[in-house]
Image (cartoon, rainbow, N blue to C red):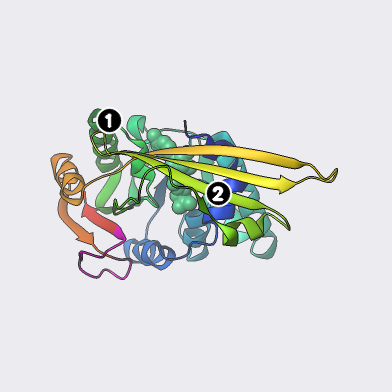
Amino acid sequence: MNDLYDTPWLYDLQHDGYRDDLAFYRRLAEDQGGPVLELGAGTGRVTLALAEVGASVVALEPNVAMRERAAARLAAAAQRRPALAERVRFIDGDARTLALDERFALIVAAFNTLMHLERMIDQDAALRRVREHLAPGGAFACDVFVPRFGPPGVVRAEPAWAALAGPGADLFTWQHHDPVAQVVVSHHRLDRLDSGGGVTRQAATLRQRYYQRLELERALRAAGFSDVRCYGDFERGPVRAGSDVWAFVARG
Ligand SMILES: C[S@@+](CC[C@H](N)C(=O)[O-])C[C@H]1O[C@@H](n2cnc3c(N)ncnc32)[C@H](O)[C@@H]1O
């Protein structure tokens, strides 16, 4: 169902320009001052930002296409700054079954990665594993979007993203939301003109299990985390009714 991740260039088209969270995760890496484990590293958007502030990063990503694109991004950046390549190690893996020999000063699951843990048993397993992989004094940080959905199935044109796909491209998105299962499925269709004058259509979907704020806070506490903080933005402001994200920092 999450075949958006099998077309990482389409994922990047929509998300690569997102910068709101980078300073939040960079600052945590600097404050924690030790090795970082990134869960769901995707195409390396946050990975690179962490490496740029000197962090050693183990970047775990289960999708091979996403991982390869992240590695290519790192290789490109390392042409200008070779030290970056030495700081990052990409690994295959799954947050639910994490079993590494190393322990980390900081573990991050940025940009809705926890939303791929659909069942409570998966969430609890992953959070327990995360805590076990923290070094003494270590911190876990993650963020999830605040669930707010428009009417189901209404198609939206996304001209700003389509423009990135080249002249004549059209990108449309729509969502179906199941409030009982707390699942939202996002559909993406990209139409591009090919060289023969025809149209090539790329379709992708993304399924996410969204959270309520106190649900995630309770899950973190149940996994043994202490000092669980939830912020309403990436500047560590309070949670407000209009917050778009919940950013959590918890101690092991
Ligand atoms: C929304 S993307 C976030 C990517 C990246 N962190 C970013 O900020 O752009 C979520 C990522 O989590 C990965 N993922 C899905 N299930 C996972 C799991 N069980 N354990 C770890 N990562 C997972 C996906 O393959 C995807 O790359």
Quarter of the picture for ligand 1?
Answer: top left
Residue 74 point in image, percent of width and height: 61, 53
Q: Is residue 235 left or right of residue 66?
A: left
User: Residue at 36% of width from left, 33% of height from top?
Assistant: 98
Residue 98 among magenta residues: no
Residue type beneath disc 2: Phe
Q: 213 and 219: which one is in front?
A: 213
Label at residue 46: none
| Count of number-bearing discs | 2
State the SS at label 1: loop
- N-terminal of the pair, mark 2 or mark 1, is 1
Residue 154 point in image, percent of width and height: 44, 47
Residue type beneath disc 1: Arg
Q: CA distance from mark 2 to mark 1?
A: 29 Å
Q: Would you say the magenta stretch is mainly helix, strand or loop?
A: loop
Q: Which residues are magenta?
A: 233-245
Residue 234 among magenta residues: yes
Q: 74 and 206: which one is in front?
A: 206
Q: 85 and 120: which one is in front?
A: 120
Residue 161 point in image, percent of width and height: 58, 58
Q: Which residue, given by chain and number where applicable, does mark 2 sit on?
A: 172
State the SS at label 2: strand
- Residue 204 appears in the rendering: yes
User: Residue at 71% of width from left, 56% of height from top?
Assistant: 166
Q: Which residue, given by chain and number where applicable, does mark 1 sit on?
A: 119
Establish whether ligand 1 lies closer than 8 Å to the Cβ of label 2.
Answer: no
User: Residue at 64% of width from left, 52% of height from top?
Assistant: 170
